[in-house]
Amino acid sequence: MELVRARNPGPLTGPGTNTWLYGLGEAVVIDPGPATPSHLDAVMAAASAIGPVAMIVVTHHHQDHAEGARQLSALTGAPLALFHTEVSAPGDLGLHHHDRILAGGAELLVLHTPGHAADHVCLFEEPRRLLFSGDHVLSGTTSVIWPPDGNMDQYLASLQLVIDSAPHRILPGHGEPIEDPDRALAELLSHRLAREQQIFELLKAGPARPRDIVTALYATYPQAVWEAAEKTVLAHLLRLEASGRVRRSTRADDSPFEVLA
């Protein structure tokens, strides 16, 4: 297993996007990252120590993970594998839930994990219970859920799917490997549900827009993450609305939400 970290640090990418190289005798590149020459050169160099690149897999379509995928495919001749709804070129391999990728001298189980993005997949090596989690589970932070492509109800269901798979180690799309997945996943689920309850309790005091809730709940966070936090709050509100616990005061896009009596 080799990690090549892109030099694209930021509020939403942490220290940078993780490109993982997996395999024995041939390499599977997971999330090629940005299309910067220095990063792609580093990926190619790391892959050469393993063997020919057999496949390039993208966990989801966000540019910090996928931008360099087609260029790397052209450089190596390896096919690009991505969720079937994103297939757009001859030779692309469309992935479905519970497909099995036979490459890199092993087998990776595809888990469709929508929530952060509708096309998000995780890859699971069952013998070692090793999970490549993309942006579904991160190290040291939480995933942004940005509607409409992001969906909180789907995210929580996908998170339970990952919990049920019982990984022993998680290799995320940003940050360091997660060596205690049971604790990390339990804390992540607890955090998301607790945040949703905080949002609901704030609405009991009166109608509020997502941005109003962010200023109350994220006051100690850097303002650079407030826009993403606002979208995640909106995702929680939409889940609460779908469950019949809250409603929008009007149908305007910036309408406040309020608790249903």
Image (tube, grey):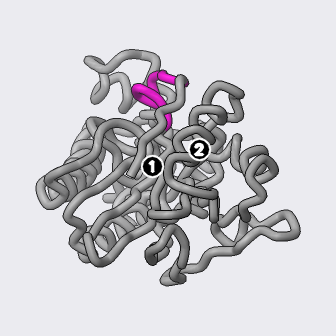
Query: Looking at the magenta stretch, what is its main secondary structure?
Result: loop
Q: Which residue is the site of mark 1? A: 135
Q: Which mark is residue 65?
A: 2
Element type where label 1 sits in the image: loop
Q: Determine contact: label 2, label 1, CB under 8 Å.
A: yes
Marks 2 and 1: which is nearer the front? Answer: 2
Q: Who's the residue at 30% across and 64% down the image?
A: 130
Residue that sits furthest to the right in the current view: 90
Please tell me whether residue 104 is drawn above or below residue 164 in the rendered image.
above
**Position in image of residue 234 (x %, y %):** 47, 45
Q: Disc 1 residue type?
A: Asp
Q: Quadrant of residue 255?
A: top right
Q: Who's the residue at 48% across and 22% down the image?
A: 10
Residue 94 included in the magenta stretch of the image: no
Residue 235: tell me if it is visible: no
* Nearest to the observer: residue 122 or residue 74: 74
